[in-house]
Image: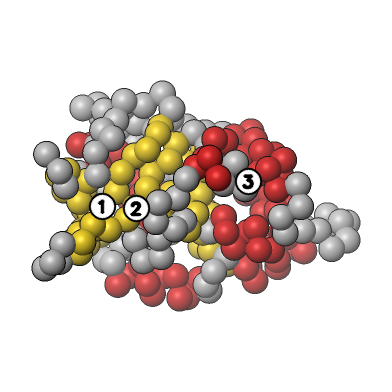
C-alpha cells in the first residue's frame, strides 16, 4: 500500500484501494437512503482537510447546515475549520452577493459561481468538493437536456482540478446504463453503498464499482460506525 492523501482518511480504506484517487477525479457515491453515503463522503473530506493545509466545500441541498453537522456529529465526525458547509440558502446568498448580472440563473450556474469564487480566493488550496445530492440538483434544474447538462457539469468540476464526490441516491439493483443523465458513464469512479440482510442482522457495505487509474478491490466490504467516524472492515464474502 502507498502513502496517500484520501486513503488515509477512513480506517480500512487502504485495504480497498492500492493507490490513491487522483486529483481532479469526479466520483459518484451511490446507494439507497440510509446507507451511509453522506457519512462516508463527509468523513473523507473532514479527515483529509484535518491533515492538509487545504480548503474544501460540502454542499448539501437536502438539509440545512445545522442539521447536517448535527447528523455528522452523531457519527463521531468533526467539522474542521477549513471545510465549508454550504446549504441551499447559503448558495443562493453567496451567488447573489457576487453581482453576476445574470437574471434568475438556474441552480447549476449558482453552484459553479460559488466554486469559481472560492477557487479564485483559495487558489490551489481548494482541493476537494462534495455535492449532496445529485438528485436534489436535478429536481431544482429540471430534466430537459439532462445528459448534456451533466456532461458540462462534470467537465466544469474537472476544469477546476478539485476532487469531487457526488452523492446520488439510487434504488437497489440500480443499473448504470439506465441513468437518465449518464452519470455513471461520465464519472471517473463509482462507490456503491448498500446492505446485506440475514435472519439475525443487517450488514452495511461499500463496494468500488469503478475507479479510473486506480487499482482496487471489487468486493463488498463491511462498513461500521466507530468512535472516531466510519471504519471499513473486511469483505463480506471471502
Task: Give 53 or 20, whichever is nearer the viewer.
Answer: 20
Task: Identify the image quadrant of the C terminus.
Answer: top left
Q: Residue at x 60, y 41 (%)?
A: 182
Distance in Å between CA atoms under marks 2 and 1:
6 Å
Residue 70 position by quadrant: bottom left
Q: Is residue 39 above or below residue 187?
A: below
Q: Earlier in the sequence, mark 2 or mark 1?
A: 2
Q: Is residue 189 above or below residue 131?
A: above
Q: Is residue 58 above or below residue 14?
A: below
184 relative to 142 in the view: left or right? left
SS at badge 2:
strand
The image shows residue 185 at horizontal and vertical percentages of 54, 35
Q: Which mark is residue 193?
A: 2
Task: Give 155 or 113, whichever is nearer the viewer.
Answer: 155
Task: Give 153 or 207, whichever is nearer the viewer.
Answer: 207
The image shows residue 51 at horizontal and vertical percentages of 33, 45
Residue 95 position by quadrant: bottom right
194 relative to 88 in the view: left or right? left
Q: Which residue is mark 1?
A: 205
SS at badge 1:
strand
Distance in Å between CA atoms under marks 1 and 3:
25 Å
Q: Residue at x 72, y 59 (%)?
A: 142
Task: Identify the image quadrant of the N terminus.
Answer: top left
Density class for disc 1 (Cα within 10 Å; few <14, some 14-19, many ≥20) is: many
Kindly check if marks 2 and 1 are in contact, taking CB atoms under 8 A apart as contact: yes
Q: Residue at x 47, y 75 (%)?
A: 66
Distance in Å between CA atoms under marks 3 and 2:
20 Å
SS at badge 3:
loop
Q: Which residue is mark 3?
A: 181
Kindly check if marks 1 and 3 are in contact, taking CB atoms under 8 A apart as contact: no
Density class for disc 2 (Cα within 10 Å; few <14, some 14-19, many ≥20) is: many
Q: Residue at x 31, y 43 (%)?
A: 207
Amino acid at each position: 500500500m502507498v502513502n496517500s492523501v484520501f486513503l488515509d482518511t477512513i480506517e480500512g480504506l487502504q485495504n480497498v484501494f492500492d493507490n490513491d484517487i487522483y486529483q481532479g477525479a469526479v466520483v459518484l457515491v451511490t446507494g439507497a437512503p440510509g446507507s451511509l453515503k453522506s457519512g462516508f463522503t463527509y468523513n473523507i473530506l473532514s479527515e483529509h482537510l484535518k491533515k492538509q493545509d487545504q480548503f474544501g466545500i460540502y454542499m448539501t441541498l437536502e438539509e440545512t447546515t445545522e442539521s447536517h453537522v448535527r447528523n455528522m456529529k452523531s457519527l463521531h465526525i468533526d467539522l474542521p475549520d477549513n471545510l465549508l458547509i454550504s446549504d441551499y440558502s447559503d448558495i443562493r446568498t453567496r451567488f447573489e452577493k457576487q453581482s453576476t448580472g445574470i437574471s434568475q440563473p438556474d441552480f447549476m450556474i449558482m453552484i459553479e459561481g460559488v466554486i469559481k469564487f472560492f477557487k479564485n480566493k483559495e487558489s490551489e488550496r481548494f482541493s476537494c468538493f462534495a455535492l449532496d445530492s445529485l438528485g436534489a440538483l436535478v429536481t431544482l434544474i429540471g430534466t430537459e437536456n439532462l445528459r448534456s447538462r451533466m456532461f458540462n457539469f462534470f467537465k466544469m468540476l474537472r476544469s477546476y482540478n478539485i476532487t469531487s464526490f457526488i452523492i446520488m441516491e439510487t434504488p437497489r439493483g440500480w443499473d448504470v446504463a439506465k441513468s437518465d443523465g449518464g452519470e455513471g458513464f461520465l464519472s471517473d469512479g463509482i462507490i456503491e453503498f448498500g446492505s446485506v440482510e440475514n435472519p439475525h442482522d443487517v450488514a452495511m457495505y461499500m463496494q468500488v464499482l469503478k475507479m479510473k487509474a486506480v487499482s482496487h478491490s471489487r468486493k463488498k466490504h463491511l462498513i461500521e460506525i466507530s468512535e472516531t467516524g466510519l471504519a471499513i472492515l473486511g469483505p463480506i464474502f471471502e
